Amino acid sequence: MRRVMMILGAVLGVVGMFLVVRTVLFVGRAVTIEAEVMAVEERRGPPKPRSKTPIHVRYRLPDGVEHLSKTSMPLLQKVEVGDRLQVLVDTADPEVVVLPLLSVLWATPITLCLAGVALLVGSCWVAPVSTKRILPAQSA
């Protein structure tokens, strides 16, 4: 059990750190631009639990080139066609657009890092508890 927790904790921690580094690099090269919501996709079919709504946004880069791209909006934030939003646009690939929200940028990397640390710490705590032996009562 301990070994499984340690391996899983290490894997989650490494993946979480990779995502943190990737997010830091993205935020470092991205520019913040105002975008206009062009379309909000309706949900069709059987109801499924979803945490984000796909939206289409139009924005103009500093060099004057206009782009249309798709991103996701958390369900708790309501947007309508014509609304203006601040978005982060990747300068290396202008089609990559992300909303500058904590829940969009950082939730997954931080959660994975914390889960990895929790499993690693838990594996260190589980070992002494699970290997403790109960000695038989000695007779007088």
Image (tube, rainbow, N blue to C red):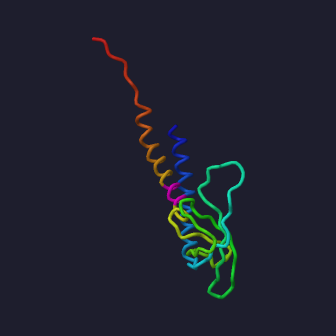
Please name the predominant secondary structure of the magenta segment in the image.
helix
**Labels in figure, total:** 0
Image-based side of 22 in relation to 140, left or right: right
Residue pushed farthest bottom? 63
Image position of 95 (left or right of 108):
right
Vertical arrangement, residue 70 with respect to residue 31, above or below? above
**Residue 34: x and y, percent?**
58, 79
- Residue 117: where, in percent of width, then height? 47, 52
Q: Quadrant of the C terminus?
A: top left
Tell me which corner region of the image, top left, top right, bottom left or bottom right, holds residue 16: bottom right
Q: Nearer the viewer, residue 33 or 85?
A: 85
Q: Hey, which quadrant is residue 64 in on the image?
A: bottom right
Q: Which residues fall within the magenta stretch? A: 107-113
Residue located 62% across and 53% down the image: 50
- Looking at the rendering, which quadrant does residue 82 occupy? bottom right
Please name the residue shown 70% across and 48% down the image.
46
Name the residue located 64 percent from the left edge and 83 percent from the top edge: 61
Nearest the eye: 124 or 73: 73
Tell me residue 25's x, y (percent). 56, 72
Above or below residue 112? Residue 54 is: below
Residue farthest top in this picture: 140
Q: Residue furthest right?
A: 45
Q: Is residue 132 magenta?
A: no
The residue at 58%/67% (across/down) is: 79
